[in-house]
Image: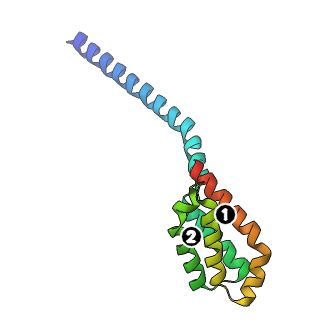
């Protein structure tokens, strides 16, 4: 009887040991992989996040009202497939620029002209980078 009890305890300890070893491997893997997964999620912005942040920057610089910002945001989101495709990007950018300029009043256009090249350049780089990921 004592032999069976000792054998049973030994088997249980072996099972616990295997479970603990498996748990340690799992936790170690999670600790090693989590920073890499987190870094990838941080760098890979979605198209909507890119556009939202670009429109927010434009709104601050040019003093867009909320309706203008929403219209520009929806314009860019509607045309995101053309903006991400390298073959149609330049034509799509020119059309988007023209439509954005139509939404601005004279005071906003003056401010927009100052930042236009930098703003569109940064937006196209971010979109191209997101499309290549």
As displayed, is residue 106 above or below residue 129?
A: below
Residue found 68% across the figure and 75% down from its top: 58
Tag of residue 123: 1
Residue positioned 64% across, 83% down in the render? 102
Q: What kind of element bears circle 1?
A: helix
Residue 22, above or below 79: above
Query: Within 10 Å of the Cα at label 2, are there few (<14), some (14-19), or many (20+) other Cα atoms?
Result: many
Q: Nearer the viewer, residue 93 or 44?
A: 93
Its colouring scheme is: rainbow
- The residue lying toward the viewer, choosing from 99 and 29, is 99
N-term-proximal mark, 1 vs 2: 2
92 or 30, nearer to the observer: 92
Left or right of 20, for residue 62: right
Q: What secondary structure is marked by label 2?
A: helix
The residues bearing labels 1 and 2 have C-alpha atoms spaced at a distance of: 10 Å
Residue 112 at what x, y percent from top left? Answer: 74, 78
Q: Is disc 1 in contact with disc 2, using a CB cutoff of under 8 Å?
A: yes
Pick the residue in front: 104 or 47: 104
Which residue in the rendered view is the most extreme toward the left? 1
Write down the residue under mark 2. Answer: 76
């Amino acid at each position: 009887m004592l032999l069976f009890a000792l054998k049973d305890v030994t088997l249980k300890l072996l099972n616990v040991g295997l479970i603990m070893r498996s748990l340690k491997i799992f936790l170690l893997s999670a600790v090693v992989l989590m920073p890499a997964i987190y870094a990838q999620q941080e760098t890979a912005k979605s198209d909507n996040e890119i556009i939202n942040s670009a429109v927010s920057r434009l709104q601050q610089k040019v003093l867009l009202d909320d309706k203008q910002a929403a219209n520009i945001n929806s314009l860019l989101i509607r045309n995101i497939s053309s903006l991400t495709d390298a073959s149609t990007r330049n034509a799509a950018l020119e059309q988007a620029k023209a439509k954005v300029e139509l939404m601005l009043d004279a005071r906003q256009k003056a401010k927009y002209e100052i930042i236009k090249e930098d703003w569109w350049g940064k937006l196209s780089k971010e979109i191209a980078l997101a499309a290549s990921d």
